[in-house]
Image (tube, rainbow, N blue to C red):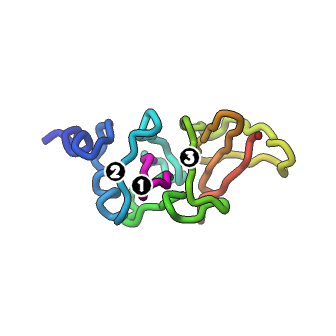
């Protein structure tokens, strides 16, 4: 049986069933269509397996639900939960920032991280940030304002 229909019913386009399972485990969250694409895949935890990030919302607050392969509990960034002192990650676009690609120093930031994992690049009209897994938690690195 194809996994695509399961995701289509959830409003997430892709061919991997994990977001559906992951979204079910994350109570109170719904898939959001405010950002395209609504789903990104990459090796976000460095285990060599594909993981997924899904744009989600809890009421008016938006965030990312990260479903890491082999991990039963998803990680919620924003969507009503504090992440980098924000509960609403209202970014306008996002993409995968591939591991190994140098990260440029953000304005007023410390040394940029050396990415050993894929990361999320979140973009606003006048700012951007890289969100990456450091082995124990997701870290925010501000790129610019």
Q: Which numbered disc covers residue 67?
A: 1
Q: Which numbered disc covers residue 54?
A: none
Q: Is residue 108 above or below residue 82?
A: above
User: How much space separates mark 2 and mark 3, taking CA atoms?
Assistant: 20 Å
Report x, y in % for residue 142: 73, 47
Q: Could you tell me if the residues under marks 1 and 2 are in contact, i.e. CB atoms within 8 Å?
A: yes
Q: Using a 10 Å C-alpha cutoff, classify the residue at mark 2 as few (fewer than 14 neighbours), some (14 to 19) or many (20 or more).
A: many
Of callouts 3 and 1, which one flags the residue occurring earlier in the amino acid sequence? 1
User: How much space separates mark 1 and mark 2, taking CA atoms?
Assistant: 7 Å
Check disc 3 and report its element: helix, strand or loop.
loop
Task: Quadrant for the C terminus, please.
Answer: top right
Q: Is residue 51 above or below residue 36?
A: below
Of callouts 1 and 2, which one flags the residue occurring earlier in the amino acid sequence? 2
- Circle 3 or circle 1, nearest the eye: 3
Q: Using a 10 Å C-alpha cutoff, classify the residue at mark 3 as few (fewer than 14 neighbours), some (14 to 19) or many (20 or more).
A: some
Which residue is disc 3 drawn over? 90
Check disc 1 and report its element: helix, strand or loop.
strand
Q: Using a 10 Å C-alpha cutoff, classify the residue at mark 1 as few (fewer than 14 neighbours), some (14 to 19) or many (20 or more).
A: many
Q: Which numbered disc covers residue 19?
A: 2
- Predominant SS of the magenta segment: strand
Q: Which residues are magenta?
A: 52-62
Q: Quadrant of residue 104?
A: top right
């Amino acid at each position: 049986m194809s996994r695509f229909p399961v995701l289509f019913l959830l409003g997430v386009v892709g061919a991997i069933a994990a977001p559906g399972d992951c979204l079910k485990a994350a109570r109170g969250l719904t898939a959001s269509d405010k950002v395209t694409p609504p789903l990104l895949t990459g090796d976000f935890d460095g285990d060599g397996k594909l993981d997924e990030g899904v744009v989600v919302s809890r009421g008016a607050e938006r965030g990312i639900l990260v479903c890491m392969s082999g991990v039963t509990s998803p990680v919620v960034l924003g969507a009503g939960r504090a992440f980098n002192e924000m509960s609403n990650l209202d970014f306008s676009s996002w993409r995968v920032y591939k591991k190994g690609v140098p990260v440029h120093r953000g304005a007023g930031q410390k040394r940029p991280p050396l990415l050993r994992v894929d990361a999320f690049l979140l973009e606003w009209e006048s700012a951007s940030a890289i969100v990456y897994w450091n082995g124990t938690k997701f870290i925010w690195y501000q790129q610019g304002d």
